[in-house]
Image (cartoon, grey):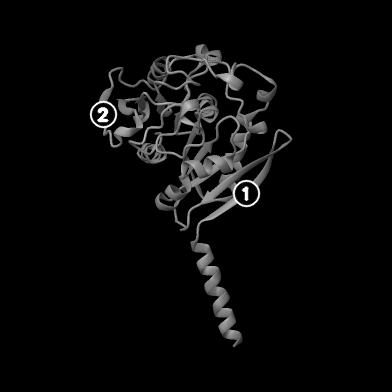
Amino acid sequence: MRLKFILFFLLLAFCSASFAQTYYRNIYSDGIKRSFVIHVPEENVETGLPLVIVLHGHGGTGKQIMKSTGFNVISDREKFIAVYPDGIKKNWNDGREKKDDTKYDDVGFISALINTISGEFKIDTARIFVTGMSNGGFMSIYLAFKLNYRILAVAPICANIPKRISSSYEFLKPVSVMLINGTDDPLVRYEGGKVGFGILKNRGYALSTDESVNIFVRENKCSAVPVHAEIQDKNIDDDCFAERYTFTGGENNTEVVLIKVVSGGHTIPGGIKNLPKTLVGNTCEDFNAPEMIWSFFKSRTCRK
């Protein structure tokens, strides 16, 4: 009987090790307690796993963006670690105009987070990626500026380069970029300018999408002439469609990709709708942004 119990617990331990794990964790950065959610895929591998950092928008949380994007499902299938940090006061200090809620060193926090995760899990430190929505998208753009020596590619959604840092924005190391923006975004306007509306007014200023893409192309030394492709309009009832512009030939095989969602709003294409259409505009249902983002990240080759 005792042998049966031992075998049962050994089997239980073995099975538990094969299941995906989601942890709620804290670390200290700059003397401040910071929180995050981390999801580790269900199978151990011999080589290091890629790391995908997913950043929530203003007013969101790591747990919220984890649920609304579905990156955990992709993590289990494709074998990468997904981490969802929490900004202080549900906000990121993303390089826009300074305010009381943007005084924290979030670049230092993300760097410390990478150090913590790489110290506890087997990750491929040459394949670290960042994506984010809105405020989180701005933060991913800021991290490409500040931590380009650690990050291989970023994929901002509904974000552009902050005007405040645009004159000094450069990559000391090339960083591939996929930018997903809607032309009818009422909060982060495609044509640039003031960010925000209503209670979210005065959230700083941003360049236009075209200006941002031109800087990404310049910094990666990509071809100035993109390859254009239509994305299949699978859902004609979503009142929008998407186009893909790919700038190839960048330094160290980098690319810049613009996903232009014509008539799209301040939403994650294919994602969960958290706010009404009357407030944020159309959600494109022709593609799933997290799946497209991971496909882009997966295709990135490591730096020489």
Q: Position of residue 209 (x, y in %)?
A: 42, 18
Percent of width and height locating residue 37? 59, 45
Can you say whether 257 is above or below 3 in the image?
above
Image quadrant for the C terminus? Answer: top left
**Which disc, if any, is residue 6?**
none
Say what amino acid the circle numbered 2 marks: Glu
Work out how far the residue at label 1 is from the one at label 2, CA to CA, in angstroms. 40 Å
Disc 2 on helix, strand or loop? Answer: strand
Residue 235 shows in the view: yes
Taking the spot 40% from the left edge, 52% from the top edge, the residue there is 77
Could you say which is closer to the camera, residue 301 or residue 158? 158
Q: Residues within 10 Å of mark 2 (few under 14, many from 20)?
A: few
Q: Which residue is mark 1?
A: 24
In this rendering, would 162 be left or right of 33? left
Q: In the image, what residue occupies the spot 68% across and 25% down?
A: 101
Q: Quadrant of residue 55?
A: top right
Residue type marked 1: Tyr
For label 1, the SS is strand
Pick the residue in front: 202 or 303: 202
Q: Residues within 10 Å of mark 1 (few under 14, many from 20)?
A: some
In front of the other: 191 or 29:
191
Given the current orientation, which residue lies at the most extreme bottom position? 1
- Say which quadrant the N terminus sits in: bottom right
Label 2 belongs to which residue?
Answer: 230
Q: Nearer the viewer, residue 9 or 210?
A: 210
Q: Where 10 falls versus 235 (above or below)?
A: below
Q: Give the image quarter of residue 180.
A: top left
Up-down relation of residue 252 to residue 187 (above or below): below
* Image coords of residue 194 (percent x, y): 53, 14
Q: Can the viewer see residue 247?
A: no
